[in-house]
Image (tube, helix red, strand yellow):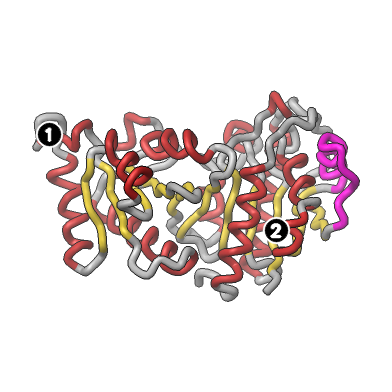
Amino acid sequence: MRVKIAVTLGDPAGVGPELAARVCHDEEVLAQADIVIVGQKKLLAGGARAAGLSFPQVTLKECGPVARTDPGQPSAAGGAQAGAFIRQAALMCLSGEVQAMTTAPVSKEYLNLAGYRYAGHTEMLAELAGGAKAVMMMAGPLLKVSLLSTHVPLRRAEEFIRPENIDYTCRTTWQWLNRYWGYENPRLAVAAFNPHAGENGLLGREEQNLIRPAVEALAGEGMDIKGPLAADALFWRVLKYGEFDAVVCMYHDQGLIPFKMIHFEDGVNVSLGLPFIRTSPDHGTAFDLAGQGRADGGSMKAAVLLAAHMARRNPAGPR
């Protein structure tokens, strides 16, 4: 079954237009999905030139304000364009015009300067989806991590460690692993917040008071879940022995540092819990590489292929 995937161009001053052009010429991608580029013709043309490719023969959904944006020169105008591309792709998903969306990288700074007051893609898409509660997962062949808190200062991460948040993140992770990756009964590990899982309260009581009760409640319902587990050894257990199918992490860097060490070139950001499928590469805008034809397209390709895979597994979407 062929599916339609909306691919946004991301921040026009970054590598997004080049990455989008590359996937539009990729035979493996084109064999599995019909690509609809969401952005502007001039930006896609610039990306194709940078990659040394011809203009892609794919459907183009023009949108966003017209502005002068140059590779490597980020601006609020570029942030406004990037925000418009995201919004249009989300509306296309919600209307059923496409079965999934893949977003090229954006700059949170320049999105905010353009008036889009969000911490990132995930938060913006959640609001566009009517206030859905999204869970950020990073997915690769060897490791999958979901995050309890995402783009917040580290000093605020503890605020998100609440039984209801742990419950929702674990349940959503379980459901999407089951539905889209085909795990019959996913095995989840929940990372501790403090070093050595708190050392029975010596190094912190979040594990005893908040994390363990939530994990035990889920286990009592029959979920295959363990935690809180000391994070310094947990990822080794996943990679060396394959003990778990996914790890639920307490904060951003706890999950993304080990993930990007392994999957920087083929990792995918997946927004769980939305009423549509959304993926993106696991890296940023790379303004310093924009327009030079040097951007690695591996993660962008993996993101489109995963979106196509997920859409084929459940054509009706997550609703």
- How crowded is the residue under tag 2: few (<14 C-alpha within 10 Å), some, or many (20+)? many
The residue nearer to you, when weighing 128 against 49, is 49
| Residue 229 in the image, given as x and y percentages of width and height | 22, 43
The residue nearer to you, when weighing 29 against 236, is 236
What distance separates the C-alpha of mark 2 from that of mark 1? Answer: 47 Å
Disc 1 secondary structure class: helix
Disc 2 and disc 1 in contact, CB within 8 angstroms = no
At 77% from the left edge and 56% from the top edge, which residue is drawn? 27
* 31 is within the stretch colored magenta: no
Query: Left of 316 or right of it: where is 230?
Result: left
Specify start and end residues of the magenta stretch as a single range: 41-57
Disc 2 secondary structure class: strand
Asked if residue 236 shows in the view, the reply is: yes
Residue placed under numbered mark 2 in the picture: 6
The residue nearer to you, when weighing 100 against 29, is 29
Three-letter amino acid code of the residue under disc 2: Ala
Residue placed under numbered mark 1 in the picture: 199
Which residue is farthest right? 54
| Residue 254 in the image, given as x and y percentages of width and height | 36, 36
**Mark number, residue 49:** none
Majority SS type along the magenta span:
helix
> Which of marks 1 and 2 precedes in the sequence?
2
Query: Left of 51 or right of it: where is 170?
Result: left
Query: Left of 156 or right of it: where is 128?
Result: right
Three-letter amino acid code of the residue under disc 1: Glu
At 19% from the left edge and 37% from the top edge, which residue is drawn? 197
Asked if residue 165 shows in the view, the reply is: no
- How crowded is the residue under tag 1: few (<14 C-alpha within 10 Å), some, or many (20+)? some
| Residue 56 in the image, given as x and y percentages of width and height | 86, 51
| Residue 109 in the image, given as x and y percentages of width and height | 59, 31
